[in-house]
Amino acid sequence: MPRKSIIIFAAACLGLAVLIGGLTLWRYQARTDTASAGAGQPVVSFGRADIGGPFQLVDQTGHPVDQSILQGRWTAVFFGFTHCPDFCPSTLQALEAAQARMGERGDDLQIVFISIDPERDTPDAMADYLQTASFPEGVVGLTGTPDQIRQAAQAYRVVYTRRDLEGGGYTMDHSTNIYLMNPAGEFAIPLSASLGPERLANLITSRMDQGN
């Protein structure tokens, strides 16, 4: 395996290990809370998975945006880039279809798409990209300087790296998780476009009903 591929694979594994560790802790909390409540015993809690945190970016209109954009609404956050050939458009399409299945509840879901490609993803480029007909209406596209994007990605345990292509140009390898954040701006559950629109809609509305 070429050295560059080994580095990319190792970075992706590291990011996945961190995410799995955090989600394991989150699942352990949920099981412990449920079991303890049923037994009438004190609840033992280790806190939420450490996903999310402060960021300073700009939206597709060029206005500064920080983590307060997550306050007051359920939000699906994911990272990608406008030149992404598969995951990013398919994720936006899956979320659009899920919102449609949620009926009026779909209006309560905000979608935030954060670029990991600041070199090409200017606010104007993000705005043009998000006008694609098959994408949801009202998606908030965020971009920024390399340092700003790095900080946001680290807060969400997102792994990404630039990969040069033969013959010129480059693409971005990156994590493919979707993070459902509650109205307090806290991580609720992980999602994936591979679940399909129906399952996504059911998981999101179920979490909305639980209220956290």
Image (cartoon, grey):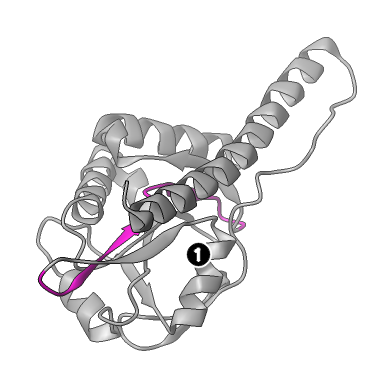
Magenta residue check for 168: yes
Identify which residue is drawn at 56% across, 55% down. 183
Residue 115, picture quadrant:
bottom left
Report the front residue among 176 and 72: 176
Q: On screen, 118 above or below 74?
A: below
User: Counting other residues with Cα less than 10 Å from the Cα at mark 1, is it few (<14), some (14-19), or many (20 or more)?
Assistant: many
- Residue 96 lies, in percent from the top left, at 23, 49
**Is 168 left or right of 27, judged from the image as shown?**
left
- Residue 3 lies, in percent from the top left, at 37, 55
Residue 88, picture quadrant:
bottom left
**Element type at marker 1?**
helix
- Residue 119 lies, in percent from the top left, at 30, 82
Q: Where are the magenta residues, as a range?
A: 167-184
Identify which residue is drawn at 34% across, 79% down. 118
Magenta residue check for 20: no
**Is 179 left or right of 24, judged from the image as shown?**
left
Instruction: Please name the amino acid that badge 1 sits on.
Output: Ala
Report the front residue among 118 and 98: 118
Q: On screen, 197 above or below 90?
A: above
Determine which residue is flagged by label 1. 153
**Count of labels shown?**
1
- Rendered-image quadrant of the C terminus: top right
Identify which residue is drawn at 22% across, 62% down. 137
Q: Residue furthest front?
A: 2
